[in-house]
Image (spheres, rainbow, N blue to C red):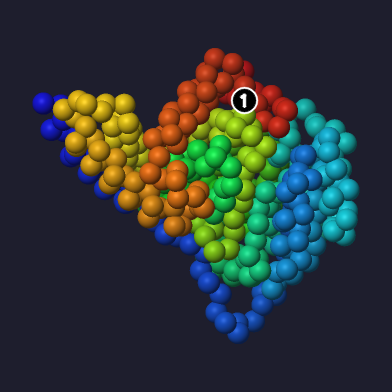
Amino acid sequence: MVWVWILPLTVLGLISGLALFRRVTIPATDAGSPPPAAKLSVIIPARDEERNLPHLLQSLRDQTFQPFEVIVVDDFSSDRTRETAESFGVSVIANAELPPGWTGKNWALWNGYAHATGDLIAFLDADIRLSPGALEALVKARERAGGVISVVPYHVTEKWHERLALITNILGIFAFASPFERRNPKKGLYGSCIVTSREDYEKVRGHEGIRSEVLDDLNLGARYREAGIPVTNYLGCGFVSFRMYEQGIRSEIQGFGKGAVLSTAALTPGTIALTAIWLVGLLVAESAAFLWGTPWIAPLAIGYLLYMLQIFYFVKYTGRFGFAIVPLHVLSGLFFVFVMLYSLYRVTVVGQVTWKGRNIKVGGR
């Protein structure tokens, strides 16, 4: 009578998802309100980003609130990243060497900060896209919230391999939107889009203080919390988006795999427990795809459809994945399982993760 437990487990999983998901979107700015008075420095680390940079740099040109300066840090690129940035008239810094004990991105961000002069700093990944009012909304959101803020961007996809990230993306949203994380002393930031004051950044020693960490954003957030500085995370829907891993599925697996296992250590037990319940319910429901003709298919199919409806709701706020992948969410569920196994192998067996041609040691390896 195992099938008797299928629907209750599905319902429990769906309730867990609703408990974890919060529509913490960036507050809209009031029409006619004065622009921020702060001098904002935008720092963009870029390693082989000649395809992404034009989108971000053009969106910065189109902002209602113009940054004081834009600094692109060319992180040992092998393509035309530097030339692309220079064509937009922004400041470009070329990293000459990677000092011992630093990961590449941390060094690029710290090096960019060392050349910045603004009293506010925005760290933006090169694959970010901004709506015209995004910087103004971000600066005002930081003023209201205090401390440091970050944004989980709205995930735009175009190719099928990109859309496989659906479930992985939703689980990532759970980690940042969960109400259990509000008081978490290890509460992290989302590294693609961070806005902080210079004063607060210097107080926590910025990326210098986490120079060797793979998960720079999560560890930086914990540093802010340790210093008593508020950490606030938003969903980027309507203001901040990105397109990730258009290069291919290999880069997608490496990108998600470098932090999939390590990031769980920073979450509270409540977030981990409810996420696990949601995921177990999802995977049980998705087993319907392989159990046609068995007595279990009816409750499994109902569970599958219920999860599909909930995912449609989540996707409104988390990304543009196309219509087809939601009814076929079993494919994304299998992709997530593969990514977790790959991440576990890289962390526990190999002792290092790979990203953008670099092997980065983890733990005590």
Amino acid carrying label 1: it is Val
* 103 relative position to 154: left or right: right
Residue at the image point whose x is 59% and y is 16% from the top: 350
Residue at the image point whose x is 19% and y is 29% from the top: 296
* 37 relative position to 240: left or right: right
x, y percent for residue 2: 15, 26
User: From this viewpoint, is residue 187 visible?
Assistant: no
Residue at the image point whose x is 57% and y is 47% from the top: 157
In the image, residue 81 above or below residue 35: above
Residue 47 occupies quadrant? top right
Q: Name the residue furthest bottom.
A: 32
Q: Nearer the viewer, residue 300 or 258?
A: 300
x, y percent for residue 98: 80, 32
Q: Nearer the viewer, residue 203 or 358?
A: 358
The residue indicated by pointer 1 is 353
At mark 1, the secondary structure is: strand
User: From this viewpoint, is residue 288 visible?
Assistant: yes
x, y percent for residue 13: 28, 41
In the image, residue 129 above or below residue 344: below
Q: Residues within 10 Å of mark 1 (few under 14, many from 20)?
A: many
x, y percent for residue 200: 64, 56
Q: Name the residue furthest front.
A: 293
Task: Name the quadrant of the C terminus.
Answer: top right
In the image, residue 84 above or below residue 295: below
Numbered marks: total: 1
Residue at the image point whose x is 19% and y is 36% from the top: 298
